Image (spheres, helix red, strand yellow):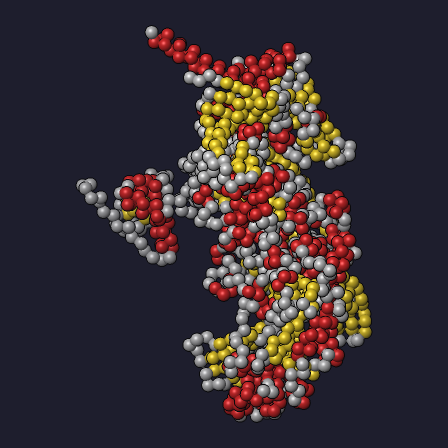
């Protein structure tokens, strides 16, 4: 089996781009799927509306609140994760309150949500604060005199349950492109080919077609160039090498998302192994 | 100068038009005219009311319509606004006052302004205070400033008067006679006054004779006799009235000679008619009756007085001439479907016809009251004589039921508030009176003259196809101006020689018709038409006057029309091969110095009706102007109606798809009205996150559709979805739904009235006490507030739960077997419909007209999309949700874009909705570049440009992308077409339709299971299903379905008399009514329906016998 190689092209707080080599699409997909659907995050799950005289109905406001991404620091996240994995999600509930009364027409923003501490077994985390990733997510517009008072309870969950728990907005990959120019000196034909590429990967000058090497990774393998001039170019790909792109919502750093995704994958494999071992023992 | 009329200029004009006219101008104008003018005319026509008592007369003076107001039960009055009427179930109406004078022996005795009834007020018409309010003020009173108005509010419900299409009245139409009859040619006219219409026909039979028929005379009358009876003594006069053409005269001769003999003098002619209407009467009576008949019932539109007779003779003469021209092959039969031969009745005309009838009745009643009052006492009070409810009730009933005088039904309809588009479209609808069950192929077809007048796309499918139409974007309907002014102008200033004089003097030239009546002859028709058009363009003649000149070898006629009900459309005037519109004008328009009206007044733009269009050569763009061109289209896209204008790239679609979309756009959920929080409509939907489409047509900016959208932009991939999107289903992304895609809320309003009955009894809204009749279980009343008996707002309610608790007084003798009922109050609570649930949203407590407490409770039901909900794109591509797929299972692009919807590739080829593909590409460009893309019909952003833009944005120009399977993670073999398309959620939702039952209610009469979801009914096991089971030989199953599980009943049959008997439980014995004790009764199991049949037959006096035999094998 090949060695797995990973190279990060970019790693920011909320964005990561990396190349993995030596895995199958199934594994790559498993990572992607886990990142989307199985990395627990915190999101508002229950809302107690105290007063709502806005145009939006309670359920619409609750739905909107749920979709506001909530930021937690890494240490708190680890505790929350643990608590989720132990099946005690109801014991680590973050409470937020919101109270907006409009004297003149205005908007209730996510920034109006105030953290009011943890409830339950994990209240010891009281020092850690939970707050929206952005303070500028509009919740509802208020006319003069309208009022919105509520208590919101954020719980841990996974994207599989509801999209609001997805930690990433984008998690995708592509195969690694392999472009082969068959006929470099191709005359006018080559211009057609270069023009056909929407990513501008091909360069044509004086009857000679070339790749722009630093752009090759941008190739989408759309084969537009190949369709334009099949004699000149051939596009293929390496399906054991992937260019990954992950964009986080800011709830936890993408690096953490990827880490957690991998850990949870491994944990599942481990628990499979455990079960297997147990079964073998009980049989013998 | 190199200025060229551009598309932007065109839309500037359209915008100016819409800003000035709005979308429902036709209704508002017509209603305004009715209130301001017609109302008074109706009163004037009714004239002074002469009572049966000689010398006692009531003079009718000026009519006043006040502002809308409510009259409370206690008699107090206060002004009102539409929102109050909607919520309190009132009629939005204003009182009409009439000045009346009591005249006795020519001396005025009393004068008063008398209240004569309530007139329903059209919302946003002149009489509606909203029309004078600014947008902010409208918001303050709970109105949506974007609401077009143009409807009425009757008992709280919004009602539209649908524009009625009709054959032009008072217009002579010629045609061939029906094949197989002796009639070869027919000339027909519907002579119509405001009050009634009379069909008059001139027929030419195979022997060349001409006869006229009209309803009041049972037989055909020879034409010459009729004309003579109308006062044309000599044959010369008669010929003059008919024609001055020798060839036509030749054709007329045989008739003239033959028929002239029948009645050589006027008196004899009258007697001829008299003998047929007053059979067996003395001669004086006969003549008098004949005169009466021809004055009253023959061509009444010309006049009802004896002095109109000569004009009638000339009109009849024209019918004859036209008929003979047809017979001689000089003209072809008239086309009944030509728009010039059609008139459209608007809200004002329709209201006028009801009011006229109501007023007539009012006057009759007034007269009766006057006489009655007079015979009793001396004192007569005008106020007490007038019974206002006659007019009030008549008007309200007509509007509430849609039954119009003349037997038309469905004239008023409940305004469609599904979304803004459907409302506007409903207000611009036109219906034809032709029966929907007959084929009428020609009438349903699109007629060339409908170009630019009626939308070629928007018409329903099925039985109403082509009969229900919609106005095109720029079409307006004429309101009508007084023909007298035009007549004066023609005769006195423009040299039209009155017809009689012309015929006597032998003036030759063009025949001039004013509102379809021959008024005279002009020597040079072409010149006359030119002058008239010139005058109109200079603003010296009203823009509603349209002229047309028909000229060929034989025919030389000028038609001048200024009547109401003609559809007209504006066009740019071209003079000498050049547009009259100049950049200067556009600049003035842009700066707001000029409005649309200035363009009309200056003759830069003019309205043409279908008749005048016959004379016009209209270029579709300025590039095709030739020296002969008279006009240029403002924009070709204006041939479409409002709804069809919403379709992006419609010219790329197969035409029926556009029609389907025009129908579906009206079912799309959206944002129906900005005041939805206040509205208590019986049913209402709204979409939580409606979006402006990225790919728009220009109409969106013109009518503020951007503020009231009806769908959402979604990422659509054309891809099979594991079989879950076969047959037009769609696969939808679960995460998209969770993020709010296509979420909507459904509202239903329940209401209850606390009626006060005469006699002191009254209903009571309360939590019903346990001892009332029909008490449900205690749980059913749980949601009620114990203080007022109405459910708490924001409480969740389920089907069957009571939301308004109400008890009613006992009903005397209500049912025959429960005599205790007479003393106990009954439970008449309002509960949530079965199968429905929701959250109590809003409660209003008001007082209705009768002073009873009216409680309305609005229940809202959140509806996130679910399996089976219906969605559609804007290209007639509809489908239901087949699968809700988790986001991680959806295919994805390398950029991480996951489609919201997967539609099946098979939806495209056979339907040829290329427009959708273009929209998809355009949507993709729009979302990537952050712009909105124009896709207006015939002028949308071209495909080439879209492709270039997409390519520049780094995507394949054909919209395809590489997708990876979300399940296996592998690249999909083929590139997939993916883009952004505007999708609509239609109001057919599973939650409203899902239904099943295992056991349940039966009908009382037949004891068979009930039908329909609302009644918890069973699913019909029908004729064809029966055949299916027979085919399978599953006869026991068949018996189980249709008998055991349906209406199995034992009956007792007497083996002696073969009639039905019964089991008497009290005496524990079987009784046969015929044989008495000696009966020999056997139980037999039959269908209850059969038992019912037997009993019904018995009740008819038929004796059905049931003959019993042993079952084979049972011995
Ligand atoms: S496959 Fe597409 S992106 Fe790659 S080089 Fe060819 S045209 Fe450019």
Which one is in front, B225 or B478?
A: B478
Which one is in front, B552 or B240?
A: B552
**Can I make out residue B669 in this image?**
no
- The residue lying at 58 percent from left, 69 percent from top is B341
Question: Quick check: B1008 left or right of B1070?
Answer: right
Find residue B765 and report its horizontal and vertical position in percent: 63, 38
Find residue B784 and report its horizontal and vertical position in percent: 61, 33
Check the image and report above or below for B8 versus B116.
Answer: above
Q: Quadrant of the N terminus of chain B?
A: bottom right
Q: Quadrant of the C terminus of chain B?
A: top left
Find residue A273 and report its horizontal and vertical position in percent: 42, 12
- The residue lying at 58 percent from left, 87 percent from top is B245
**Can I make out residue B943 in this image?**
yes
- The residue lying at 26 percent from left, 45 percent from top is B1080
Question: Quick check: B853 left or right of B655?
Answer: right
Find residue B477 and report its horizontal and vertical position in percent: 65, 63
- The residue lying at 51 percent from left, 58 percent from top is B464
Check the image and report above or below for B574 versus A65.
Answer: below
Q: How many numbered dots are placed on residues in this image?
A: 0
Which one is in front, B1092 or B470?
A: B470
Question: Quick check: A114 left or right of B822?
Answer: right
Quarter-wise, where is residue A123 in the image?
A: top right
């Amino acid at each position: 089996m090949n060695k797995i190689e990973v190279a990060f092209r970019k790693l920011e707080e909320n964005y990561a781009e990396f190349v993995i080599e030596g895995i199958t699409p199934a594994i790559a997909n498993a990572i992607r799927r886990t990142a989307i659907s199985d990395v627990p995050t915190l999101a508002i799950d229950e809302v107690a509306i105290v007063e709502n005289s806005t145009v939006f109905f309670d359920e619409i406001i609750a739905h909107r609140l749920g979709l506001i991404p909530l930021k937690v620091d890494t240490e708190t996240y680890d505790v929350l994760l643990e608590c989720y994995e132990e099946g005690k999600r109801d014991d680590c509930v973050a409470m937020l309150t919101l109270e907006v009364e409009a004297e003149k027409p205005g908007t209730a923003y996510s920034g109006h949500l105030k953290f009011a501490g943890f409830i339950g077994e994990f209240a010891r985390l009281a020092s850690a604060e939970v707050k929206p990733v952005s303070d500028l997510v509009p919740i509802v517009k208020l006319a003069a005199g309208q009022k919105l008072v509520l208590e919101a309870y954020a719980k841990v969950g996974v994207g599989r349950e509801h999209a609001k728990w997805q930690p990433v907005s984008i998690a995708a990959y592509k195969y690694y492109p392999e472009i082969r120019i068959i006929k470099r000196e191709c005359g006018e034909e080559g211009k057609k080919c270069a023009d056909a590429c929407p990513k501008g990967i091909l360069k044509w000058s004086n009857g000679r077609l070339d790749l722009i090497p630093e752009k090759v990774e941008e190739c989408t393998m759309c084969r537009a160039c190949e369709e334009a001039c099949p004699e000149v170019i051939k596009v293929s790909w390496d399906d054991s090498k992937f260019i990954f792109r992950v964009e986080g919502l800011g709830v936890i750093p993408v690096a953490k998302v990827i880490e957690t995704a991998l850990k949870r994958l491994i944990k599942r494999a481990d628990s499979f192994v455990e079960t297997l071992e147990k079964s073998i023992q009980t049989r013998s | 100068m190199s200025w060229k009329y551009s598309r932007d200029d065109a839309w500037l004009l359209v915008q100016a038009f819409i800003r000035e006219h709005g979308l429902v101008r036709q209704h508002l104008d017509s209603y305004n005219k009715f209130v301001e003018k017609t109302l008074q005319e109706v009163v004037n026509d009714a004239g002074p009311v002469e009572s049966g008592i000689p010398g006692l007369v009531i003079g009718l003076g000026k009519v006043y319509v006040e502002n809308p107001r409510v009259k409370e039960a206690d008699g107090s009055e206060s002004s009102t606004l539409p929102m109050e009427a909607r919520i309190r179930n009132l009629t939005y109406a204003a009182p009409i006052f009439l000045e009346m004078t009591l005249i006795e022996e020519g001396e005025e005795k009393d004068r008063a302004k008398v209240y004569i009834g309530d007139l329903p007020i059209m919302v946003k018409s002149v009489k509606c205070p909203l029309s004078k309010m600014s947008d902010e003020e409208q918001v303050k009173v709970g109105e949506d400033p974007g609401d077009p108005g143009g409807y009425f509010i009757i008992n709280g419900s919004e009602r539209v008067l649908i524009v009625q299409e009709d054959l032009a009245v008072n217009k002579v139409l010629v045609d061939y006679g029906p094949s197989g009859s002796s009639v070869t040619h027919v000339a027909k006219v519907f002579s119509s006054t405001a009050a009634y219409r009379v069909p008059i026909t001139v027929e030419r039979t195979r022997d060349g004779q001409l006869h006229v028929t009209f309803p009041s005379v049972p037989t055909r009358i020879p034409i010459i006799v009729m004309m003579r009876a109308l006062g044309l003594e000599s044959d010369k006069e008669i010929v003059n009235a008919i024609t001055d053409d020798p060839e036509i005269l030749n054709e007329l001769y045989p008739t003239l000679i033959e028929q002239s003999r029948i009645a050589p003098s006027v008196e004899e002619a009258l007697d001829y008619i008299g003998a047929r209407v007053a059979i067996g009467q003395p001669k004086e009576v006969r003549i008098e009756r004949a005169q009466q008949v021809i004055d009253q019932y023959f061509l009444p539109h010309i006049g009802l007085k004896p002095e109109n007779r000569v004009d009638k003779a000339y009109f009849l003469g024209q019918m004859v001439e036209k008929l003979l021209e047809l017979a001689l092959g000089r003209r072809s039969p008239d086309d009944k479907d030509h728009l010039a031969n059609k008139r459209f009745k608007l809200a004002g005309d329709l209201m006028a016809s009801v009011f006229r009838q109501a007023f007539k009745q009012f006057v009759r009643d007034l007269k009766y009251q006057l006489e009655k009052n007079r015979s009793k006492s001396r004192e007569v009070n005008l106020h007490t004589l007038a019974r206002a409810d006659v007019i009030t009730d008549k008007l309200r009933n007509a509007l509430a039921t849609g039954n119009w005088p003349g037997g038309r039904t469905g004239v008023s309809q409940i305004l469609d508030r599904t979304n803004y588009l459907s409302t506007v479209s409903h207000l611009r609808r036109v219906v034809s009176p032709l029966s929907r069950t007959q084929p009428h192929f020609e009438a349903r077809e699109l007629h060339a003259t409908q170009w630019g007048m009626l939308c070629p796309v928007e018409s329903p499918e099925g039985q109403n196809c082509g009969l229900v139409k919609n106005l095109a974007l720029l079409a307006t309907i004429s309101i009508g101006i007084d023909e007298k002014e035009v007549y004066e102008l023609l005769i006195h200033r423009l040299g039209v020689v009155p017809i009689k004089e012309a015929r006597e003097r032998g003036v030759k030239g063009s025949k001039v018709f004013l509102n379809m009546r021959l008024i005279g002859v002009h020597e040079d028709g072409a010149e006359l038409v030119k002058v008239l058009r010139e005058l109109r363009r200079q603003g010296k003649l009203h823009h509603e006057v349209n002229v047309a000149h028909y000229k060929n070898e034989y025919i030389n006629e000028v038609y001048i029309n200024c009547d109401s009900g003609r559809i007209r459309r504006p066009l740019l005037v071209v003079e000498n091969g050049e547009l009259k519109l100049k950049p200067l004008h556009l600049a003035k328009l842009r700066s707001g110095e000029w409005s649309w009206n200035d363009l009309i007044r200056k003759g830069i733009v003019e309205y043409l009706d279908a008749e005048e269009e016959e004379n016009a050569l209209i270029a579709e763009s300025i590039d095709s102007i030739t020296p002969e061109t008279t006009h240029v289209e403002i924009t070709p896209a204006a041939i479409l109606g409002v709804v069809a204008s919403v379709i992006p790239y419609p010219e790329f679609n197969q035409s029926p798809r556009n029609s389907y979309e025009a129908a579906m756009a009206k079912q799309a959920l959206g944002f129906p009205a900005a005041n939805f929080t206040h509205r208590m409509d019986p049913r209402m939907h709204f979409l939580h996150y409606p979006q402006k489409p990225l790919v728009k047509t220009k109409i969106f900016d013109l009518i503020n559709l951007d503020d009231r959208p009806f769908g959402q932009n979604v990422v659509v991939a054309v891809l099979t979805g594991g079989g879950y999107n076969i047959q037009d289903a769609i696969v939808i992304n679960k995460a998209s739904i969770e993020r709010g895609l296509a979420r909507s809320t459904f509202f239903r309003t329940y209401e209850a009235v606390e009626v006060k009955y005469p006699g002191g009894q009254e209903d009571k809204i309360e939590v019903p006490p346990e001892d009332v009749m029909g008490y449900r279980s205690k749980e059913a009343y749980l949601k009620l507030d114990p203080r007022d008996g109405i459910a708490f707002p924001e409480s969740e309610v389920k089907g069957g739960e009571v939301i308004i608790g109400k008890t009613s007084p006992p009903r005397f003798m209500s049912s025959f077997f429960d005599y205790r009922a007479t003393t106990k109050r009954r439970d008449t609570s309002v509960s949530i419909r079965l199968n429905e649930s929701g959250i109590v949203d809003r409660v209003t407590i008001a007082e209705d007209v009768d002073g009873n407490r009216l409680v309305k409770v609005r229940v809202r039901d959140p509806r996130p999309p679910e399996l089976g909900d219906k969605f559609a794109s804007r290209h007639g591509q509809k489908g239901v949700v087949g699968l809700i797929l988790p986001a991680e299972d959806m295919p994805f692009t390398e950029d991480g874009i996951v489609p919201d919807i997967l539609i099946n590739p098979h939806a495209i080829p056979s339907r040829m909705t290329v427009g959708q593909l273009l929209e998809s590409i355009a949507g993709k460009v729009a979302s990537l570049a952050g712009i909105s893309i124009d896709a207006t019909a015939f002028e949308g952003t071209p495909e080439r440009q879209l492709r270039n833009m997409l390519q520049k944005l780094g995507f394949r120009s054909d919209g395809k992308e590489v997708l990876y399977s979300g399940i296996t993670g592998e690249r999909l073999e083929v590139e997939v077409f993916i883009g952004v398309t505007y999708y609509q959620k239609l109001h057919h939702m599973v939650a409203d339709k899902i239904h099943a039952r295992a056991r349940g209610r039966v009908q009382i009469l037949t004891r068979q299971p009930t039908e329909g979801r609302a009644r918890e009914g069973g699913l019909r096991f029908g004729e064809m299903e029966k055949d299916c089971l027979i085919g399978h030989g599953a006869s026991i199953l068949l018996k189980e379905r249709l008998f055991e599980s349906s209406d199995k009943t034992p009956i007792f049959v007497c083996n002696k008399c073969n009639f039905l008997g019964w089991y008497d439980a009290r005496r524990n014995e079987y009784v046969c009514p015929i044989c008495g004790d000696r009966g020999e009764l056997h139980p037999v199991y039959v269908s209850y329906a059969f038992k019912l049949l037997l009993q019904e037959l018995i009740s008819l006096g038929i004796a059905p016998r049931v003959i019993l035999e042993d079952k084979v094998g049972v011995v």
